[in-house]
Image (cartoon, grey):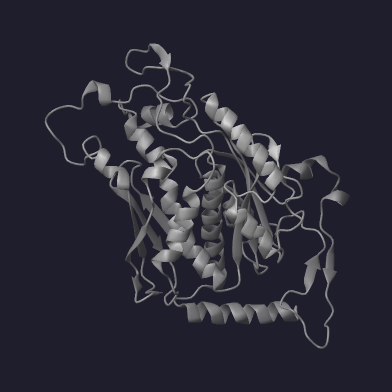
Amino acid sequence: MLRFLTAGESHGKGLLVILEGIPADLPLAEEELNLDLARRQRGYGRGGRMKIESDRAEIFSGVRRGKTLGSPVGILIRNRDWENWKELMKVENNISALPAAQALKVPRPGHADLAGGIKFGHRDLRNVLERASARETAARTAAGAVCRRLLAEFGTVIRSQVIEIGGVKVKGEGSKVKENDYWEKVEKSELRCGDLGAEKRMKKLIDQARSKGDTVGGVFEVRAFGLPPGLGSYCQWDLRLDGRLAGAMMSIPAIKGVEIGMGFLAGRKPGSQVHDEIFYKSAVGGQRSAVNFYRKTNRAGGLEGGVTNGEELVIRAAMKPISTLLKPKNSVQIDTKEAVPATVERSDVCAVPAAAVVGEGMTALELARAFLEKFGGDSIREVRRNFLSYLREVEAY
C-alpha cells in the first residue's frame, strides 16, 4: 500500500518525508523533485519567505544509482531560514524559560492557533503555528513529485491552472486544455493563468489587497490526462476515488471547497444537462484503441461511481484568503483575555498558484495509490505487466 508521512516545523531545521510503497526500479532523480518545489515557490503575491528559501530536496534513502529500491523513499528539505530561528526553535531543553515577549499569545482568526492551543494545552501558540503552517506542503509536493514520476511511466500527465482569484475569473478555461502550448503559457504565467487578460486583472486585485494590508483567495483546477478506466471502487465508501481525492484536496491548508467535473453546478441543472452520453468507437483499419467507449462531454470530470471512466480527471478547489493580515483583525490574548489585534507573521497576499502545485502533488499521491491498488507489484516491470494485461481486457470489452 502506498502511504506517506511528513514531519517538521515551519522554522525548524527542515521537513522530512517518508514515502512507502513505491515499486523498485522506478527511475528517480532529485532534480525532478526540485522542479516541482521551485514551481510551488513561484507566484505573484508571495511573501518574503520565498526570497529566503530556495527549496532543494535531498533523497535520503530508498534510491540507488538513479532507481528506487522498493524500500521507503526518504526525502529531506532543509530550511535555510533555520539560522535565524535556531535559538527560538531549538530542540534542547534549557533551565531558563523562554522570554515572555517571545511567546505567541494572540491567535489569528482563520488559523489553527486557538483551536490547536486548546486541543494540546499549549500556552505558547507558536507550538501550533509552526506545524499548522502551509510550509509543510513543500514536503507533500516532494512526495507528490515521486508519484507523478510513477504515473508518467504509464502515460498519465497531471496539470494545474488558476481559474479565479478574488472573484476575477478566466474565460473558456476548458477550451484548450489538451494543447501543450496552452500549458506552456500557464507555466510561464506568474499566476498559473492561461488567460492573459484575466491575469492582468488578478494582479491588479492582488496589488490592491497588498496596499490595504489584506489578502485574497481563489480557485485552482487540476487535470489528469491519460488515466485508464477502473481506478477506485464503488464497493465501499472509503474506496471511492472521488471521495479520496476530495479529502486529499481538503487537507491542503486554506482549502474550503472541492468539486469534480461540473461540481456544484450539477445541483442546479436537470439530469439531461448533467450526464455524459456514452459512445463507442468502431475499429478503423482493423485497429482498436485501449478504451473504445467514450463521451463527447465530460461533466462528470472523469469519475462515475467513484471509479475513473477513461476521460480526463477534472478537480477544482477553492482556497480562502491567507489568515495572516498585515492589518490584523480583532483577537484575544489567551492569558489576560484582553481584546487585542491578532498576531502578525510574515505571510503571502495570495498563494493560490502555489496551492495549485500542491494540489497536483496531492492528486498524484491519490492516483498513484489507486493505480498501485489496481496494478500493484514489487517492481515497475511487474506493475507494467499487470497494467498491459488489463488494457488488453479493456480493449476486448
Residue occupying the point 77% across, 56% down:
175
Residue furthest right as drawn: 272
**Going by the image, does 379 lie left or right of 130?**
right
Who is closer to the viewer here, 230 or 333? Answer: 333
Residue occupying the point 54% across, 42% down:
44
Kindly tell me whether residue 107 is visible in this rendering: yes
Please determine whether, in this image, residue 387 is positioned above or below residue 218: below
Kindly tell me whether residue 240 is visible in this rendering: no
**Going by the image, does 191 lie left or right of 229?**
left
**Going by the image, does 360 lie left or right of 281?**
left
Would you identify the image quadrant in which residue 133 lies? top left
Who is closer to the viewer here, 215 or 276? Answer: 215
Q: Position of residue 35 (x, y in %)?
A: 47, 60
**Going by the image, does 3 lie left or right of 233?**
left
Residue occupying the point 39% across, 54% down:
5
Q: Position of residue 92 (x, y in %)?
A: 17, 40
Please determine whether, in this image, residue 271 is positioned above or below residue 88: below
Q: Position of residue 329 (x, y in %)?
A: 49, 19
* Number of callouts: 0
Please determine whether, in this image, residue 230 is positioned above or below residue 336: below
